Each structure stands twice: as structure tokens, then as C-alpha cells.
Amino acid sequence: MSSNATAQGETAPPRLPLPGNPLGTIRASLHSHHLPKWGLLIYCCDYRCDATWDSFMATLHWNVTDALSLLKATDLAASLDMRVWSDQSALDGASVDRVRDAFKAWVDSTEAKEETKDAPLDWGGADYPRYTYCVHVDADAVDSVVRRAPQPQRFDGEKVGYVNLVRLDMREITDGGEDREEEEEEEDNGGKGNVVRAPVSRLFGPETYGELYDLAAFDRMRRD
């Protein structure tokens, strides 16, 4: 990420996350940290049926739209970007590790750097969820949402529908030293420590996104 020093006389941007205020955290990232977008990138790893995928995405959009409306946060809709990465030759049946690699390549890309060029924070910590987490969607995740979970306009209170929330390798996003790296290597167990099944009814709402500015939120999701 780019680092822009605060000009003399200007007020420093707030440190994120704002305690107990996930919606305010997103707004601060947009207005004070100068990010143009919020929202997670979605990697499609299931190409069995276009109509089924469309139904899956409709459910995701309904969840986030419903949440924004209920929370009186519709001002965040215009900057929301839940882009789908779709490449059947590269992603059909892709593993979490393959998706993580593709996501890391995007985080390092010119496009991502352009999005973060005016942000005040240095890369080296999990400063912004959009550049730390992505969504892996395989066939079972699609089926959980489209075939097993309640369909819009019914809320999935039992958290049947899920996706895989993938975090970049912690050694790539934290300043840890050798001890930290060894600890993460043991915890990862082949990368498994950096992925969690996340209920669609919870993940695709601004409150959970705002909570993900805190690295500990992902670890709490793993324990739930």
C-alpha cells in the first residue's frame, strides 16, 4: 500500500477499526482513508450451471441490500464492489490455496495499488479487508445457498448457506519476525488456518465487513 504523510496542519485520519462502530469504520475508510471501494472479491470455482450461479449471486446481493436497508446504511451501496472473478480454465474446481494465490496476485497488481494509492496506512498489517480477504465459492458452497438454505425473502437464521472466507497468509500481512512465522506455520497446517466457512447471512453485510478491520475478528469466526 502507498503511504501518504499527513500534510502539516491536517488532521490525521482515524485509526481503524473504530471501536464498536463497524459502519463508521467503513465510512471512515472511504472518506478519511480515501478508499474508493469496499467489499470482498468473489472467486467462482463452480461452472456447472449459469442459472444456478445467478441464483447464488442474487441471494448474496439480497443479503447485503437487506442489511444496508435495515441498518440505514444505504449510503454505502454506491461504493460497494463484490466483483466476481470468473475464469473456468483457471478456477473450475480450484482449491483454496489456488484462489489465495490468485488473490495475492491481484493485491500486488497495478489495479489494487491504484485503489489504495491515497490511503494513509503502510502495507504490513491487515489494514483493509478488501486487500486481506477474499471469497472462495465451490460447488458445495453454491448448493448450500441455492438448494439447502432458505431463499430470499427469507433470512437464513440457521446459517445453512456458506462460502469460504480466505485470508492471505499471515506471514505476508504482518510484521512478525521468526517466532511469529514459526507460530503461524504450525497454526496454518497447510494453509487451513487461513480459511473459514462463513455464513452468507452473516458475511455479506456491512457489520461483519467492518469487523474484519480487526484481525482478531477472523480468528473469532474460526472459533465460532
Image: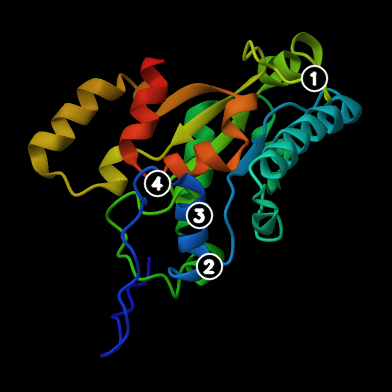
Residue kind at label 2, given as amino acid type: Glu
Does label 2 or label 3 sit earlier along the sequence?
Answer: 3
- Please say whether residue 223 is visible from this viewpoint: yes
Residue kind at label 1, given as amino acid type: Arg
- Helix, strand or loop at label 1? It is loop
Per the model, the C-alpha gap separating discs 2 and 1 is 35 Å
Q: Nearer the viewer, mark 4 or mark 1?
A: 1
Per the model, the C-alpha gap separating discs 3 and 1 is 27 Å
- CA neighbours of label 2 inside 10 A, class few (<14), some (14 to 19), many (20+): some
Does label 2 or label 1 sit earlier along the sequence?
Answer: 2
Identify the mark at residue 1; answer none if there is no mark. none
Q: Which quarter of the picture shows residue 54?
A: top right
Q: Which quarter of the picture shows residue 92?
A: top right
- Please say whether residue 191 is visible from this viewpoint: no
Does label 4 or label 2 sit earlier along the sequence?
Answer: 2
Residue kind at label 3, given as amino acid type: Ile
Does label 4 or label 1 sit earlier along the sequence?
Answer: 1
Residue kind at label 4, given as amino acid type: Tyr
The residue that mark 3 highlights is 26
Task: Tell which of 209 and 99 is nearer to you.
Answer: 209
Image-based side of 224 in relation to 6, left or right: right
Identify the mark at residue 115; answer none if there is no mark. 2
Task: Tell which of 214 and 166 is nearer to you.
Answer: 214
The residue that mark 4 highlights is 213
Per the model, the C-alpha gap separating discs 4 and 2 is 17 Å
The residue that mark 1 highlights is 154
Image-based side of 221 in relation to 109, left or right: left
Does label 4 or label 3 sit earlier along the sequence?
Answer: 3
Q: Nearer the viewer, mark 4 or mark 3?
A: 3
Residue found at the far left of this picture: 179
